[in-house]
Image (cartoon, coloured by chain):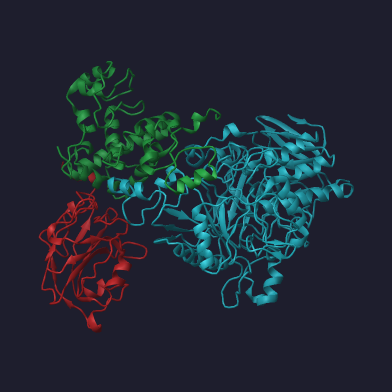
Chain colours: A red, B cyan, C green
Amino acid sequence: MGVALLLTGAAVTGLRGQAPTTFVVESPTMTTGRFMPRDYSPDGRNLSPPLTWSGLPAGTRQVAVISQDFGAGRPPPWVHWIIYNIPGDAGGLPEGIPFDPDHPMPAEIAGAVQGNNGWGLPAYRGPAPPLGSVHNYHFAVFALDEALDLPPGLDRGELLLAIEGHVIGQGDMVPLYERQPMNQFPR
Amino acid sequence: MTTQLRGTDVVIVGMGAAGGVAALPLAEAGLNVVGLEAGTWLDQRDFAPDEIRNNYRDWPMLVKKTEQERPTSRATSATRANQIGGHPMMNAVGGTTLHYWAQSWRLNPWDFRVMTETTQRYGASRIPRGSTVEDWPFGYDELEPFYDRVEREIGISGQAGNVRGRISSRGNRFEGPRERDFPMPPLRWTGFHDRMADAARSLGWNPFPGPAAVNSQAYQNRPGCGYHGFCNKGGCPINAKNATHITTIPRAVDTGNLKVVTRAHVTTLEVDSNGRVTGVNYVVGSNEYFQPARVVLLASYTYENVRMLLLSNSRAYPDGLSNNQGQVGRHYFSHHQGAGVSAFFPYDLNSWYGLPAQGVAVDDFADDNFDHTDLDFIGGGNLWVMSDRRPISAANMGTYGQSRNWGSTWKRFIHEHSDRTHGSYIQKTTLPYEDNYLDLDPEVTDPLGLPVIRITGQFKDNERAIAGFMQDKMEDWYREAGAIEVNRGGLGNTMGASTHAYGGTRMGDNPETNVVDRWGFSHEAPNLGVLGASVMGTSGARNPTLTSQALSWRTAAHLVESWGDIAE
Amino acid sequence: MTDSKGRLPAISRRDLLRTAGAAGAAALVPDAVTAATEETTSTAAAGERQLGTALPSETGPLPTRALANLTARETEILSAMVDRLIPSDELGPGALDAGVLRFIDRVLSESGTNAADAYRSGLAALDTYSRYTRGSPFIDLSTVDQDSVLIDVQIGAATGAGVGFVGGSGSFFNMVKSHTWQGMFGDPEYGGNVNFVGWDLLDYPGVRLGVSPEDQRALEADQLEPVRRSAYDYGIFE
């Protein structure tokens, strides 16, 4: 896991061609290599998960996040979530970012906007892998040296192109998910 | 128990676009004609401006027979064919002309001589690999008088661009020379058309109003178009759309020499031991009939024309009528009309009223109207901008990433933007190829147990290259007119059943590669004629209907002149 | 009970349907209509066969009638779903006010068993999915959670053994959406677009048999008065 996988299919260079520094990305409810809670998937409430990051390089002005599955999509990756224009000092994303543009962003990430995921929705939509398969979900976080203030609704390709040359730091985490048959859920 | 009917001079199978035209010169010449039509007579009372019925319940096209004979289709012979969802043709007296878009073009001279023109200008190697294209057995000039005649009989409105060599920039400067102007001026333009025409001129192009089989003013005791907005897959409630059931067919009936039989489902054609057709079998409900005729003209649209030939086996024609050379079904193609481009504007287009035939056309990139030396394709496309919008489809428009397509945010979006999208129509040169063809499906049958048509066809590199090129042009055009977002469709792959289906009974001098001769009569069964786009060997960048009607008139006129020879 | 914007909805449909016992059930049937129901409590059954008194509509949505082709519970769920697809809001009436449920009921009457079965199994699956994943029946969820559920149904993610969407949740969603759009924006002849509220939302200038050049110019100057007639009001069509 890490930078190499993040960069699959996309050339993302940092400032003056230097390799970006890496930083830590974590979550109060998820861990790399472990199954994420079902409330971050359509098997549950399908809320966007909370993320925290630290150690971003000095000069970070804005942050962008892509959640993607390199084991799905033709061609991969299948994109679950794109969110950017996150203030550089935000420190993370709270749980349950609204999927409806009528509902405002939480104050701590005021100004953030969502891009179009693989379903064409400007929202988080969680893992729905085929029953019986385990998939990895890369949450890739990019630290940018400029407040690009990009328009909403960009897809992954457009976002990566727009942040080209501005990435001074990258971090990620990769929890897993496997679907359970519905009738196993206790209700 | 088959009822043997009294013989007639000519049987026409299908009273649609092509059959409905041929009936008139035959009847006027005094020949007895029986027109067999699987559908019924419809009239203005059947054509309410009702979007649900016309566009969501497919009413005009859900007439029984075509629905039950839906072709199967597949990209190549390596895969299995699946039956298509709906069949784009209608059974009625007047056929699909009752509800079609009524764009009514002549082909350009280049379309008749693609092989020669391409070879001379660019070299033989520029003919796409695998294409079986041939020059037509005659050129545009030969067909011109028939275009002229049919334009007047049907009633075509438009603006000439080339009258006897004199070019007018108000019309299409690239068209073949016409003897005279259209019988009616063109349909009017909306403010959006004007804006698009201005944008085209800014790009150095030559926009013009397109020709339509729709009255722009009173003509032949029928009113001018009402522009009511329900013309797209809808019949005309005021008889301003010039379908054959209100033009050529009733005039033929009035001669006393045309008898139209409705609900007549023709199944097979009979031949004698000399290989001449003797008549057709048809059913009305559960009653079976044989209609003897001295000459049979097939005019049941491309798929059924081919199908009826393949189903009519006999000792003289063991592989299907007129198919001893194996050419029936060959050189088929579905016109490349897809790979559309749509756009989102920051202003209202005022497109709620209008019709698909009311349009701004650009032919600068059609045919060989531009230099292909450094390009990787031959031919081109016609760019077309129409005024056409109805409520449900407007509410189904894409949201260009601004909202999901339901809910409160969507409701605000649609309230603001319902009249701000546009979709263009781009018809492109499509050629016949060795591995695109029609045959009978080995598994799927209709309720009578007869196999349906199987389409094996794929758009090739040439068509896809044209499609990409034309998308670039259309995007340029939209953006010049102020569009803020532009979307493109895919370039096209499998040829499904099409509203513009060509070939299968191709017309040409060479009997080894064509089914009918230069007059439209079978090379093998001399008293069998074929009418419709199934005889056309190239498409050009425009709709086939007027050309198929001009060819029909020409075939009928030849039959009249050569009656003794053909009918024996 | 305020919504996410802090507004009090005019009598919400949910409230209407859940008003206790017979009174609530009676509100389902403002006219003397025999509703075909299978799944009713005894009090509700009694209520549905009474001549109900229609609740005053105030500024809110019309009272729901149980559909001929769906049970009361199925109608409730469908009603809640349709209400989210095109809600009633400050911009104007939504799908329920437009009579989309009546439109759908007619479609089901005309289409036969396959369409009705598709609705029944889909609505049951929608409710199962809501309960399993969001913890409550669909009609009890907040509007935000209902929207979240419907998004997942739309994109085909509402799968999982035991939920019960036949042929995928996306095809059920698309069927209901397609009917809702036709019912909202189609000719009122079919039972929807009541009072032409759908055409008003789009600013559609209306069905005319002839649009003169003056009409077109007026349209382009934003001065054309809308015509509010069904195609069939013209009296010449069959």
**Residue C42 vertical position relative to residue B514 in the rendered view, above or below:** above
Query: Is C68 or B183 nearer to us in this picture?
Result: B183
Relative to B275, is A137 above or below? below
Q: Is residue C212 shown left or right of residue C55?
A: right
Residue B316 in sight from this viewpoint:
no
Name the foreground residue: B402 vs C35: B402
Question: Relative to the observer, which residue lies in front, C197 or B68?
Answer: C197
Residue B541 % position (x, y): 61, 60
Q: How many marks?
A: 0
**Residue B98, image x and y in percent?**
62, 41
Question: Where's the N terminus of chain B, which quadrant?
Answer: top right
Q: Nearer the viewer, residue C51 or C150?
A: C51
Q: Relative to A80, is B185 on the left or the right?
A: right
Question: Residue at (13%, 58%) from the top-left corner?
Answer: A107
Q: Quadrant of residue B373?
A: bottom right
Q: Position of residue B259 (x, y in %)?
A: 76, 34
Q: Quadrant of residue C7?
A: top left
In this view of the protein, can residue B37 be seen by the observer? yes
Q: Is residue C83 left or right of residue B168?
A: left
Give how far across and how far down residue B483 sits, in percent: 42, 61
